[in-house]
Amino acid sequence: MSSVIGDQPQMPTVRPDVPLASIKSFVGRERELDIAEQALARTRLVTFKGPAGVGKTSLAHQLATRMEDRDGVDVVTVELAAVEATDAGVEGALVKRFGLLNNSDTVTTVQLMRFLRDQHLLLVLDNAEHLVVPAGGEAAPLPKLVRALLGTAPGVKILVTSQFRLGIGGAEYVLDVPPLSCAPTGDDTLSEALQLVRDRVPGSKPLDTAEHEIATRACQAVDGIPLAVEMMSGLRDAMTWPEILDGLQDPLNLLVTDDAEHTHHHSLHAAMRLTHELLDEPLHNLWAVLSVFPGTFDADAATAVSEGTGIKVGHPRRALTSLVHRSVLTQEERRGRSWYAMVAPIRHFGIHANADLVDRARIAHTEHFLEVARRAAEQWYGPDEVEWMYLLDTHMPSLRTAVRHLLEHAEPCQALELALNLCLTRYFPFAGVLTEGRRLLETCLEAQGDTASILIVQALALGAWTATIQGKHTVAAALLEQADHHLARLEPDTPRPEALDYAELAYAFITERDPARARMSVLALHEHARRTGDPMAYLFAAIDAGFHADRRTAYDIADTHLANATHSGAPWVISWALWASALVEHHHGTPAKALELLQQALRMQVDMGDTWGPAWTLWLIAVVTAHAGNHLVATQLFAGAWARQRRTDVVIEGLQPWLRVQTRAVLACRAVLGDRRFEIEREQADLTLSYEDVVELALSLPSPAAAGEATDLPPGGLSRREYDIVRLLAADPALTNPQLAARLHIARRSAEHLLFKARAKTGVEGRDGFTRWLAEQPHTTESGRA
């Protein structure tokens, strides 16, 4: 068949790319490849968008190879990096690639439309960012041509790689190409970034297992940008990993290459400069301002810092959207809000692009987050409590940076105020990082020198309270002593801070070894709570009463706290009020009611993402379960609770009321199971049950029956879901993973994960082995009797 160009008939000259043997490995990206392939099945234009060096070209080549090999698709690639940003330049590049003779008077775009209208191929337009930005009042050349080709060549699909999207509404599927993952996987599998390092380091210096941690830190320093990872890996033959990591404090100057493979980006600096040149001045300024954010930020923070710096960017959200579209920022949605971030190389370029503007932005950034911490301390107790916790968690890198900026610029009082306000929000318990909160206070306290102030006394008291609830009573006692010493240095009529009274009362209740003496703290702590209205003081008064008070007093205080918390609508405080009420039920009521309250609290804590609460709710469920006579389950729950407590850096030996209750429960489990079996079951649960498994076990417990009544448990330390997998495969080993998922109404990946864990716990290799394994298991009951 012939095609006609102008008046001259010509033979078809489409020559697909010559398939080349891969000369280097391709790492990860399976999810992106699957999404892109599905998108090309539905639409005819896909754009791989992302910052310079993120691997858009490699991903496009991998996708094209997959479609060539598997589907027989013809692929034609046009490299556009060096093409002039004009209509003639873009058209000429395509005409040259297709081997057309451009001797006709026909408009070149029309020639291409006629030539491609009967073709069936995937057209890859690589490195197109400079061709999709309007300039000088003229429309960008590439979107115009692509729109024309899509309208006249129904058999042509187009894949574009660009830092910017084309902006062809309704026709373009934009896939944001992310950096490689850097986080350790938790098993023997290397992260994507570390796989790339392993494949790219010179053969004379292969990546050793002992180097994984420092190499991971180097990958994280460049946010997993593949170009940067490849460049730094190439330095390994001349530098040690510590030297590379140190040099990455200035990555734009370190990561330079003359490798022919990277002709488009001889250095990270060159890659960033190209992006910078394609933006106008307001976006240059915004780039510089936003580079002071060390982590993610929202539009409110970006607007506040920009306005504080004095730059004009027009509508803030439109300006942020422009930077997202141009791959300077990334955007993701969390809890109905947009969050933005810059990858490290882009941020470093912005910091150095306009030093004066960045200096002003740092001041505005610090002032904004001082105000954020003040508002959080004032507003956290209420319906927006969890939102505040998430907001603070997301902004924590910026909040730490603000503290550091204040300390570096001789503002120690403001730094201490910021740290104190953060600790008053209870963010650190929520996140399970109480030690971090104490260290932040300590850093700011050390900067105060020999001064004495009420702020220092408050900070010392809060640090002591934090150490107390971690079970570190020696640290707490020292901080309380320092607080009293500083208070004595103030004016005689200085009011005693309520925070110090609260810290001392909590210390007395938690560290007292004599239960009779500990009971004396109940009324004092309750009186303090009523006087101040502090929800945390009320919580600890309710817990103190649950451990030490008589029945009537315990119910009165716990019920009052639960009613107050419920009225406030603060979810985290409500979950702890339920916990305190369950403690009272455990001592004075029924196991069934205690378990009901605890399961309600645990669901709330898990749903809100609390880290600290589940460590103690699982612990109390273990106590209640042991009291009800279900000693095997109690042992498994204790193992899960203790693992969670270790993660939050808690020493239960320093928490005397908890320790006394735990000792009784553990002794009961040992008495029924025997010391040997208790240790085996505890260790097996610790090694095989994930946090999710333990939560599932706790939430699936039925209402406790009479003590000693047997309740069926899955054998072999399996969770109930894993046991379901085993039973299904024992009955029908031919079931596939998708079929297992369908039977259990769960996702395929969840079924695969459960199957993996079931194999690990049972030692079964093939699917048909579950039939024999299950037949060999005794019918194990809750009390441990077969």
Image: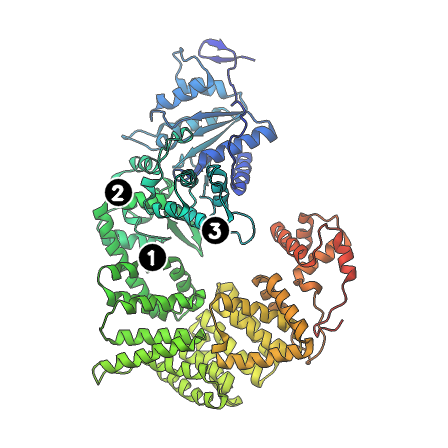
Q: How crowded is mark 2: few (under 14 residues within 10 Å), some or many (20 or more)?
A: some
Is 667 situated left or right of 535 in this image? right
Residues marked 3 and 2 touching at CB (< 8 Å):
no
Going from the N terminus, do you reach mark 1 or mark 2 first?
A: 2
> Can you name the residue that lies furthest to the front here?
204
Q: In which quarter of the image is residue 444?
A: bottom left
Q: What residue type is labelled 2?
A: Ala
Going from the N terminus, do you reach mark 3 or mark 2 first?
A: 3
Q: Is residue 199 above or below residue 148?
A: below
Q: Which amino acid does label 1 sit on?
A: Ser
Q: Is residue 93 above or below residue 242?
A: above
Q: In which quarter of the image is residue 6?
A: top left
Residue 379: percent from left, percent from top: 35, 69
Q: How crowded is mark 3: few (under 14 residues within 10 Å), some or many (20 or more)?
A: some
Residue 220: percent from left, percent from top: 42, 49
Residue 520: percent from left, percent from top: 44, 90
Q: In this view, does 704 lie above or below 410?
A: below
> Which of labels 3 and 2 is toward the front?
3
Q: Give the SS element for disc 2.
A: helix
Residue 752: percent from left, percent from top: 64, 51
Q: Give the SS element for disc 3.
A: loop
Question: CA separation, marks 3 and 1?
Answer: 21 Å
From the viewer's side, name the closer residue of 606 and 456.
Answer: 456
The residue carrying mark 1 is: 398
The residue carrying mark 3 is: 183
Q: In which quarter of the image is residue 448?
A: bottom left
Q: What residue type is labelled 3?
A: Ala
Residue shown at 29% from the left, 47% from the top: 315
The residue carrying mark 2 is: 353
Question: CA separation, marks 3 and 2?
Answer: 30 Å
